[in-house]
Amino acid sequence: RKTRFTQHPAAQPGVYGIVDIAPAMADYAPAILCVTADPNAAWPNRVAAPSEAFTTTADDLATRLEELLDRPVVVAYDGDGDVVDATVAAVAGPDRCVLGPVAVGDDPETARAAVAFALAAARDEAAQKAKVEDQMNAEASCVGSCRWVATRLKKILAEHPGWASAALADSRSSELARLAAQTRALPEMSCVVCGTTGAGKSTLLNALLGESEVLPTNGMRACTAVLIELRHRAAAKGERAYKGEAEFLTREEWDKEEAALFEELTNQEGRAILNVADPNAYNHASFCKLYSVYGEAYTHESTYEIRDPTTGNKRRVAMTIAELRAKLRRTRCATRFLGTTQTVEADDPRGFRRSLERFMDSSNVLADGACWPLVRKVKAAGPWAVLQSGACLIDAPGTHDSDSARGAVVQRALKEADSVWIVSNINRAVNDRTAKDLLGESFKRTLLMDGTYGRLVFVATQSDVLQRSEVVRALRLDRDATDLECAKARNAFTKKRVLDDFYAGLQDMDRAAGDAPRPRAELEAAFEMPVFTVSSVDHQKHSGARLNDGAPRVFGNDPAATEVPALTKFVHAASLSMRAKKVLLQTRELLAFAEALESLVTAKPADATENRLRAAAKAAFDARAATLPGALDGA
């Protein structure tokens, strides 16, 4: 049964409403509606009768359709205004569910797959949100109780100063302060995302966040210049949805880094090198950073004439390093932000990205007056559902950053991370040197010591970029295999090879320790490294984050095969699991502290006989222990 709503005379070209109740989709009775490319623009349409023509937005129209169809509506927006290109699905169920944008192609099967996927994603998100809220409420109750206990213990100890010696009291008070500090906020799971230039880290994170380009991306070079921490933010009424902070280096840190940069920009006469045109030169990066901060002040009027003592001729020379640094110190530029934290807020992702861009984007390295060389790290928070469960995603600029201050920040983040994601382009994932370095012995030993789920994750990106003939030949597929079949086959091959290398590396660690290598099955039971092969771009097209980039390249009929939904589920599962362990550990530590303190305070003072017995036992133990080194040497 089909009902067509005619176009209003004042409507823009290509704006039609088409409701299509398809028997093949009877499980959730979809209605298909075509709208314009801009879902937020107001546009005229009439939904029921000519007399009811009105101007509305797509979401308002969805509400109207719900009333007409007497069922909830899921909204999808097209990317180019084609009347066959977008989808709205009316679904049976008790709750209203409006999604958007969801970009689909001209193929009806693709449209139906997109609608089905959108509906499943909506249900999963609702279920996940309920689960997260339940656990966070339980955590808040537990942490709140621990906070109350810590506060009471502190008060009790303060009211009875003579309960122990000064040294012991100070030690216990310091430990209590550490435990109390853990109860000030709910724990989070920190995930450091590592990879080389071109690995697609920022595009991956944009896809997970459900955005187009909150993080800067560039197809030609690296953009992420600083460490970026991403967290969920539930803005209160009247607050803006997005908030960011840029934490700058101190003056001392920048002076130290600037001196290191000038070491690579000093000629044999001790004078400054004022230009490095060759991008492959060893000191090009150092020049770019200084020019980005100081601009023309670095190169302009930085020379003067001297008379050559040998020939007596005049010649023009650059300033000495000391002279140039003194000149730059007097220049008013981005260095005025040193030692500060700059805050930005925005209502929409585009405005937020523009506000934060100068603090974190190095894609135009020769733009003077830039801030990114001076920034230690950036914190960004927004309404990102993937982070609702308490994960903090950290986009690292590179594990081999030569900048002393920022490099230390990255290394510290890696050391303190709850989870480390190794990101590599799928075409070189198996042989990626950086990935192998990160999977090196010391790194694996550190991360896998406790075997916690999600401690180490491997993500191969750009699974939608392939040459079908090459994949068919390399994997010996049927020559009529589709792009989708080729992509799935390559994904399976990549996962197998990455895991084979990972477990073979663990067996090598056993051999290096002088032990027999454990069987693969035993290692798999003890250590799990999830591997994902994702297409960030195709997922963004399905979700509507890339409305103007056309239809999905490979995964048009199978949105789940982009594996971004699976990675999102993993983030929630790992985050909830790790948070629960942290809360349990905090509670047990505080309980153990309280019990030890109770034993200490209530213990009966020892009498003279007990003191003599303890002294005799200690003397006997010390005498016996003194003979152990010689006995061990003899053995």
Image: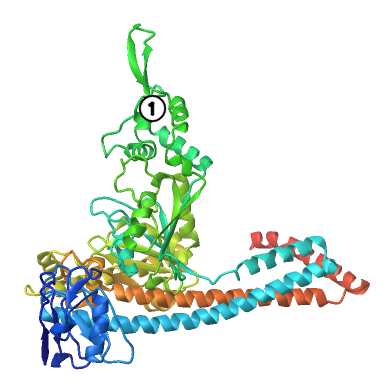
Q: Position of residue 502 (x, y in %)?
A: 35, 67
138, above or below 314, in the image: below
Give whichever of 470, 388 is nearer the camera: 388
Spot the residue most to the front: 51
Q: Position of residue 360 (x, y in %)?
A: 37, 51
Quadrant of the image containing the C terminus? bottom right
In the shown orientation, is residue 590 left or right of residue 552?
right
Q: Residue at x 40, y 53 (%)?
A: 399
In the shown orientation, is residue 240 left or right of residue 340?
left
Mark 1 crowd level (few <14, some 14–19, many ≥20, 10 Å Cα): many
Type of amino acid under label 1: Ala
Quadrant of the image containing the N terminus? bottom left
Give whichever of 317, 402 is nearer the camera: 317
Note whether residue 514 is visible. Answer: no
Q: Residue at x 16, y 68 (%)?
A: 553
Q: Position of residue 229 (x, y in %)?
A: 43, 60
Note whether residue 517 is visible. Answer: yes
Give whichever of 42, 27 is nearer the camera: 42
Q: Position of residue 364 (x, y in %)?
A: 29, 45
Q: Residue at x 78, y 72 (%)?
A: 156
The answer to which quarter of the image holds residue 534 is bottom left
Q: Residue at x 36, y 73 (%)?
A: 530
Instruction: Say which residue label 1 marks.
Output: 272
Give whichever of 272, 34 is nearer the camera: 34
In the shown orientation, is residue 80 left or right of residue 304?
left
